[in-house]
Image (tube, rainbow, N blue to C red):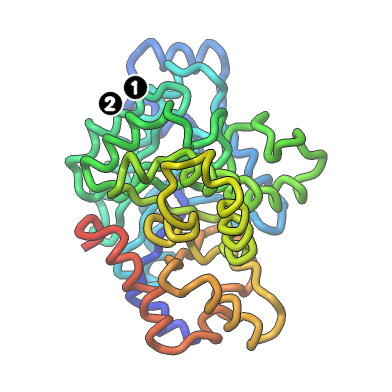
Amino acid sequence: MTVATLTDAVDCDLHVAPSSFAELLPYLDQYWRSYIDDATVRLFQAAYPVGAGTTGEPPAASHADLEPVLDAAGPRRAIVNCLTLNGLHRNPHYGTAIATAVNEWVRDEFLARDDRLRAGIAVSTLDIPAAVAEVERIAGDRRFAHVLLPVRSEVPYGNRLYHPLYAAAQAHGLPIAVHAWGRPGTAPRLSGVTTTYFEDYVSNAHIAQMQMMSFVAEGVFGEFAELKVAFLECGFAWLPPQLWRFDKDWKGVWREVPWVKGRPSEHVRSHMRFTTEPAQLPAHHEQIAQVITMVGPEMLLYASDHPHQHGDGIERLLDALGAEEAEAILRGNAATFYGDRIA
């Protein structure tokens, strides 16, 4: 596909981040400014180590940094996501304060300066009542498009612990966006931590599979029939075999989850969407087309994932699609999923 084809797309995942605490200090009260200064706390982005092939450039720290990227790509809308909370330690009061600061920084630095932009609401998963309060505080600003959670959580997202957050999100028509990575020290797999960045990077898809199953098997969509969930930067090519296994085993043990009405794959297809980066596609054009048919083009949301680098997956994906499918992935699916928050 040509660059012109991507023009006017809806980019559902584009990264921004403050380069230091200096950008956030105006949004923090005196106690937290002293806390940061006295403890020499610093920002930390372990998910994207400098020099790793997937990291790319640092995320935009200002609208001046981001504007040339937007002008070159020409999106109709772009949802900026700030993952700064992923690098924080485990003090829930601190995490809540930083979440509010991040949201106000994003609002002032990006949303107020560019009508093309929308944003994710940063919340701390260490304090769910505080996360609910932050959603209630922000939700009236229609430029915020979803509630941003890290895919690596202390408790799987199907757990009732998170129900108040889902209730708030559903009440305001806000999808939940589960993004790759999470706090350092959160094991990326059930058997424990990895020893290399390579293993850690690959493991994001495995965690996403677990979270996808948790949402369905623990009955979230039975409680919240209008809730939508997007998985960002977690891949999608793994969906066909995972959904097949999910349905197959449900037929044998459905009595354990009587609240799952119908095949689990039906719940996934009704409530969930997945971004196109990283695409992780097979080598041959015909096989790519087969993967997209099995996944379903309606399940995919276009995302550049700027500035991260995952190879030429999006170009190869679009080359394997017909015009109608490409239009859906680049624009139509996002319009349906997000509604008037990206209008």
Marks 2/1: CA–CA distance: 6 Å
Q: As shown in the figure, which amino acid type bears the numbered disc 1?
A: Pro
Image vertical order of residue 272 relative to residue 23, above or below: below
Label 2, on which residue? 133
Q: Nearer the viewer, residue 245 or 231?
A: 245
What residue is drawn where x is 30% and y is 50%?
145
Circles 2 and 1 in contact, beta carbons < 8 Å: yes
Residue 299: where, in percent of width, then height?
Answer: 44, 67
Residue 225: where, in percent of width, then height?
Answer: 30, 47
Q: Secondary structure at mark 1?
A: helix
Mark 1 neighbour class, 10 Å CA radius: few under 14, some 14 to 19, many 20 or more? some
Q: Nearer the viewer, residue 118 or 168?
A: 168
What residue is drawn where x is 54% and y is 55%?
233
Q: Quadrant of residue 76?
A: bottom left
Mark 2 neighbour class, 10 Å CA radius: few under 14, some 14 to 19, many 20 or more? some
Quadrant for the C terminus, please: bottom left
* Residue 34 can be seen, yes or no: yes
Image vertical order of residue 182 relative to residue 78, above or below: above
What residue is drawn where x is 64% and y is 64%?
241
What residue is drawn where x is 69% and y is 48%?
203
Extreme residue in the right direction:
195
Q: Secondary structure at mark 2?
A: helix
Residue 23: where, in percent of width, then height?
Answer: 40, 34
Q: Quadrant of residue 55?
A: bottom right
Q: Nearer the viewer, residue 272 or 219?
A: 219
* Residue 207, disc: none
Q: As shown in the figure, which amino acid type bears the numbered disc 2?
A: Ala
User: In the drawing, does residue 58 fall left or right of residue 128?
Assistant: right
Residue 98: where, in percent of width, then height?
Answer: 41, 27
Label 1, on which residue? 129
